Amino acid sequence: MPNDLIYKMAVTRIPKVGGVTAKNLISYCGGAEAVFRAKKRELLKIPGIGPVIADNILTQTVLHEAEAELEWIEQHDIQPIFYLDDTYPDRMRLYEDAPLMLYYKGNADLNAARIVSIVGTRKPTERGKAICTEIVEGLKDYDVLIVSGLAYGIDVTAHRKCLEIGVPTVGILGHGLDQIYPAAHRQVGLEMCENGGLLTEFSYKAGPNREHFPMRNRIIAGMSDALIVVESGAGGGSIISAKLGNKYNKSVFAVPGRLRDDQSKGCNGLIKRNKAHLLESVEDVAYIMEWIEEGAPKPAVQKQLFIDLTENEQAIVNILKTADEVTIDTITFEAKMYPAQVSSLLLNLEFKGLVKSLPGKRYMLTY
C-alpha cells in the first residue's frame, strides 16, 4: 500500500476533526500528506482550524497511530477506502457529512446496481421478524445488496435471512473491525464476509461507543437507494436512519402496523407524516424504484404479505381466492358461519383493503 495512505488515515484520527473539517484540511493544503507538512500559521488560516486542532496536527502523534493501524489492516485483509477512491460508495460520496475514510472486509460491491437498507427495532415482534424475512426473500428476485447494522432484532434477522438464501449483505458497524458487536453476532458477521461484508468508518480499537451508532446510521442511509423500516418505536436508531434517508433524498418505506402498538408507532408515524411510502409488499419497492420494466414479467411475490388476519378472516379470503367473484350466500355456506358474522368479517376485510364489494351482494379480492 502507498505511504500516502498513512496520511489519509491519520487525518481521520486528529482529535476534534470530523469528516467535514478533514476534507477542508485536505482541500486547503492540497493533499493529506500536505496537512502534516503545513506550518501552524498556515493551518490557522483554514476555516474551522483553531490553535488546539493545529497543535494536534503538529504533534503528529496520529501519524504513528496510523502506521500501526496500517500494519494491522494488512495482516487482517482489511481494505481501506478513501473518499476519492473508485471503490468508495458513490451514492454517499457527495454528502457533506460522508466519512473521509472507510474500512471494509468482504467481497460485495459497495456500488452494486441496487442497494436496499433494512432497519428496525432491536426488540421485534414475531410478526416483525416474519415480515423482515419475507422482504428479504422478495428482494432476492431483484438482485440487490442488502445493508443493515448487525444489531439485535430486525438488523440481524435481515442479515441471517440473506445468508440463508444467498443474498449479499453488508453490515455497517459502530466500531472498529478488530471486533464484532454484539458478540452474539460474531459468527453471523464472519459469515457475512464470505457473501457481503462488514464496513465501518471507525479505526481499529475504536469501541462500540453510544455516540458511534447515530454516526453509523448515516452510512446505512447514505449508501442505499431505498431504506425500509420494518418495526420501530416512536424514536431510536431506525427513525434516525429514516430521517437521514429523507435528508439524502432516498426512497424511504415503512411497514404499517396496528394502532397503538408500541413497535408500530415509528412506522405509522413516518407514513402519517408522508416521510415514508407505505409498504405492503416488495412489489411496492420495485414499483417506486422503477425496477419493473413495462411489459416484463413480475417476480412471483405475494401481494399482501403484511396484513394481520384472524382465523375466520383468513377462511373467507381462502374462499374468495377460488373465484373472481363470490356471493355472500356462497361464502356463508362454505365458511359454515352465521350471515351476520360473515357480513362483519367482510366489512373488516374491506377496511383492510383486501376485499371489494360488488352489486348483487358479491365480493372479490383486490389483489
Image (cartoon, grey):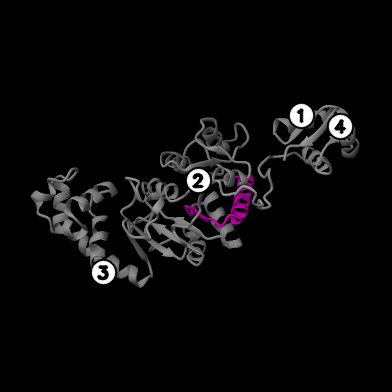
The residue under the point 47% across, 57% down is 112
Relative placement, left or right, of 202 versus 319 is: left
Point out the tag, 3 or 1, that comes first from the N-terminus. 3
Residue 335: x and y in percent read 87, 38
Would you call the spot at circle 3 few (<14 residues within 10 Å), some (14-19), or many (20 or more)?
few
Point out the tag, 4 or 1, that comes first from the N-terminus. 4
Q: Nearer the viewer, residue 322 or 153?
A: 322
Q: Residue furthest bottom?
A: 75
Which circle marks residue 347 in the picture? 1
72 w.r.t. 291: above or below? below
Q: CA distance from mark 1 to mark 2?
A: 33 Å
Which circle marks residue 227 in the picture? 2
Instruction: Look at the image and tell me in which quarter the C terminus lies.
Output: top right
From the image, tell me which residue sits under label 4.
328
Q: What is the three-letter code of the residue carrying label 4?
A: Ile
Mark 4 and mark 1 in contact? Answer it, CB < 8 Å: no
Point out the tag, 4 or 3, that comes first from the N-terminus. 3
Does residue 259 show up? yes
Point out the tag, 1 or 2, that comes first from the N-terminus. 2
Which circle marks residue 2 in the picture? 3
172 w.r.t. 48: above or below? below
**Figure disc tally:** 4
Mark 1 and mark 2 in contact? Answer it, CB < 8 Å: no
**Residue stretch in magenta:** 125-150
The residue under the point 74% across, 33% down is 349
Point out the tag, 4 or 2, that comes first from the N-terminus. 2
Q: Nearer the viewer, residue 298 or 166?
A: 298
Q: Which SS class for mark 1?
A: helix
Image-quadrant location for residue 161:
bottom right
Instruction: Look at the image and tell me in which quarter the N terminus lies.
Output: bottom left
Would you call the spot at circle 1 few (<14 residues within 10 Å), some (14-19), or many (20 or more)?
some
